[in-house]
Amino acid sequence: MDLQFYQAVIGKHILSDEVILTENRELHIIERRGLAFYQKYRPYFGDIIARPDYIFLDDRPNTVLVCKSFVEDLRTVHLVIRLVVEGENPDYKNSIITAIEENDKRFCQRLRNRVPLYSKEDDLTTGNNGGIINIE
């Protein structure tokens, strides 16, 4: 996870560049989205975090929705990530809470109703190289 990039986007000091996926959360994703979804998109989780198309602030504290569109499927995959920020336990790691899939129509509705913190289309720096991503 590129700390400088994410800190600039959310405006808070993030304590770790690691993002973990616990076994419990992995099972949650499989139960909610199905094994086929998990097997298809799990290999892309690192890329979604490293090179998101959009980042939205979630309703829960220090939580973001990191999104990437998959053109061939007309789907957008979102990872809900809980970030560990300054003032929290430094032993905790940023963690994937869940993964969500939306069709193109639903994602366009999201874009109309919510303002993203980050949009790849508006990123003029193109310096986001992704940094280090550790998903366990």
Image: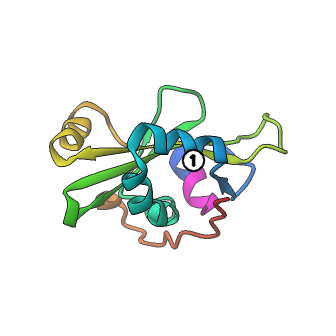
Q: Residue at x 63, y 60 (%)?
A: 135
Seen in the picture, residue 3 relative to 95 is either above or below; the reply is: below
Left or right side of 103 for 89: right
In this picture the colour scheme is rainbow
Name the one closer to the observer, 37 or 96: 37
Residue 20 versus residue 113 in the image, above or below: below
Quadrant where the N terminus sits is bottom right
Hey, which quadrant is residue 69 in on the image?
Answer: bottom left
Image coordinates for residue 130, horizontal then vertical, percent: 54, 69
Residue type at tag 1 = Glu
In the rendered image, which quarter contains the C terminus? bottom right
- 47 above or below 29? below
Examine the rendering and report whether any part of residue 71 can be seen. Answer: yes
Q: Is residue 8 magenta?
A: no
Query: x, y (%) of residue 14?
Result: 69, 48
Q: Is residue 93 left or right of residue 99?
A: right
Instruction: Give, as a single range, the part of the protein colored magenta.
Output: 1-7
Element on which disc 1 rests: helix
Q: Could you tell whether 82 is left or right of 48 in the image?
A: right
Q: Main secondary structure of the magenta part?
A: helix
What residue did someone put label 1 on? Answer: 26
- Residue 88 on image: x %, y %: 78, 35
